[in-house]
Image (cartoon, rainbow, N blue to C red):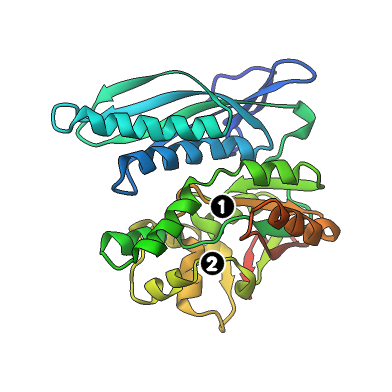
Amino acid sequence: MVFPTDENVLVGLSRADDAGIYKVSEDLALIQTVDFFTPVVDDPYVFGQIAAANALSDVYAMGGTPKTAMNLVAFPSKELALSILRSILEGGMDKMREAEVALMGGHSIEDREIKYGLSVTGFIHPSRILMKNSLRPGDSLILTKPLGIGIMNTAAKAGMVSDDLNLKTIELMTELNRTAARVMEGFNVSACTDITGFGLAGHLAEMVDGSRGSARIFSDQVPLIHEALEFANMGFLPTAAYNNKAFRIDMVRFAETIHRSNQDILFDPQTSGGLLIAVKEKQASDLVRALKDFGVKDAALFGEVTDGTEEIIHVV
């Protein structure tokens, strides 16, 4: 299939990335992305916040600044009160205000299932674009939010999660990746993506695939919601985690010492997860320190990019 394009498309459908980028001038390019999904929490206002933060994240992952957004809404107005929709939109707008993004309009349809998200446009200098598949051997790998969000949401639906722990998970999902994106601007970052539905292993596999390199994950250094390991041991894994593992397991090699729950959490689908940053090794510790200093408290160095053409993820 041949996709419509032109010479100003810098990142398009010819390469899978977090967003598309179109060159406007020598100093300006537009970042365009869209994302929406069904509720992951019961509170409509919080759902709106999460959906908006998740959609904005793709722009941050490309190294850009989100500027405008359009609402995307599917809602069963004949079955549910419009006050629920109003709360969803208020949550989204509050998160856009936090990100200093202007809401330009949107589109809604009648649907039997609630869906909400954003179409987002951002700005970036054409020379500062960060893409997935530009890893360099010797890079260190940093993650800015802990894993386990999908597992926690699954356990919460079963009534197994305390109010305090559920609030912690919600805070992670509603947290913008803006601070992390701004901090990494001052470092020699070679590649970046955000961790969402494919889990850490799946999104790292996208970065490794076609890179003519491999990656090594140090399992004991991966930032985790520690309670999520307990729930994983109890079997509270989302269906998508099994799908992610089946899709990418051929690219992942686990050391025999890695417990099953530690394997599973690498495939756990994240909603509005953190940034996965590849940075020059000698700057990695400084970047983690800077992230923590600016409030990205869970940031951690957890892996490295290795030489070789096998394009495999080794978990040790």
The residue beneath circle 2 is 224
Please tell me whether residue 294 is drawn above or below residue 8 in the rendered image. Answer: below
In the rendered structure, the answer to whether residue 51 lies left or right of residue 122 reads left
Residue 74 image-quadrant placement: top left
Please tell me whether residue 224 is drawn above or below residue 39 in the rendered image. Answer: below
The residue beneath circle 1 is 203
Q: Position of residue 199 (x, y in %)?
A: 50, 56
Label 1 and label 2: CA atoms lie apart by 16 Å
Please tell me whether residue 129 is drawn above or below residue 26 in the rendered image. Answer: below
Secondary structure found at label 1 = helix
Residue in the foreground of this view, choosing between 10 and 4: 10
Q: Earlier in the sequence, mark 1 or mark 2?
A: 1
In the rendered structure, the answer to whether residue 150 lies left or right of residue 203 reads left
Q: Which mark is residue 32?
A: none
**Total tally of numbered discs in the picture:** 2
Q: Position of residue 1 (x, y in %)?
A: 50, 28
